[in-house]
Image: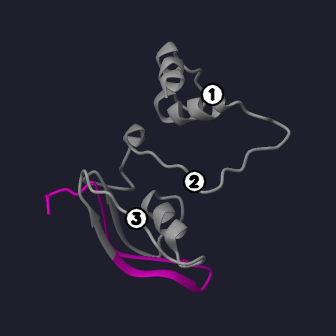
Amino acid sequence: MSVNPALQCESLSVAFDSSPVLHELDLAVETGDFVVLLGGNGSGKTTLVRALLGLVPRRDGRVMLLGTPIEQFRDWKRIGYVPQRLALPTSMPATVGEVVLSGRISRAGLLRPYSKVDREAAHEA
């Protein structure tokens, strides 16, 4: 194992209200690894990914992204995450190009307009 895995958690625990979902999970993913999460509905796969990204609060444990504690991590353009379900208002239909372009938000910034480079990258994709 390398000194700084791409993703690492130690003793990760997550609970919603008083219901434990993850309990003292240890995981290390090396750069270049390919990981698959398998499990039945409600087994905690989505909760694990969301906890690793800091999107749900941890009850206990530590998460490191690219060698940095998640609380201090700021290089989000290096992280890609596509949620299982994306809640888009049905009154605002989006084109395929707009959805692909939304993947550039971490580079452009949430309230900044997309650059020519962003639009070209989305078109190429």
Q: In the image shown, does 90 or 64 lie closer to the viewer? A: 90
The kind of secondary structure the magenta stretch mainly shows is strand
Outermost residue to the right: 91
Is the N terminus in the top left, top right, bottom left or bottom right quadrant?
bottom left
Disc on the earlier residue, 3 or 2: 3
Placement of 107 over or under 59, stated as above or below:
above
Alpha carbon of mark 1 to alpha carbon of mark 3: how far?
Answer: 28 Å
Left or right: 121 as drawn, with respect to 16: left
Residue at point 70%, 30% (across, down): 95
Residue at point 47%, 71% (across, down): 58
Residue at point 49%, 29% (across, down): 125
Is the residue marked by circle 2 packed among few (<14), some (14-19), or many (20+) residues within 10 Å?
few
Placement of 34 over or under 11, stated as above or below:
above
The residue singled out by tag 3 in the image is 36
Magenta stretch? 1-25
The residue singled out by tag 2 in the image is 83
Disc on the earlier residue, 1 or 3: 3
Q: Which mark is residue 78?
A: none
Asked if the residue at tag 1 contacts the one at tag 2, i.e. Cβ–Cβ closer than 8 Å, the answer is no
Res 29 → quadrant: bottom left
Is the residue marked by circle 3 packed among few (<14), some (14-19), or many (20+) residues within 10 Å?
few
Asked if the residue at tag 2 contacts the one at tag 3, i.e. Cβ–Cβ closer than 8 Å, the answer is no
The residue singled out by tag 1 in the image is 97
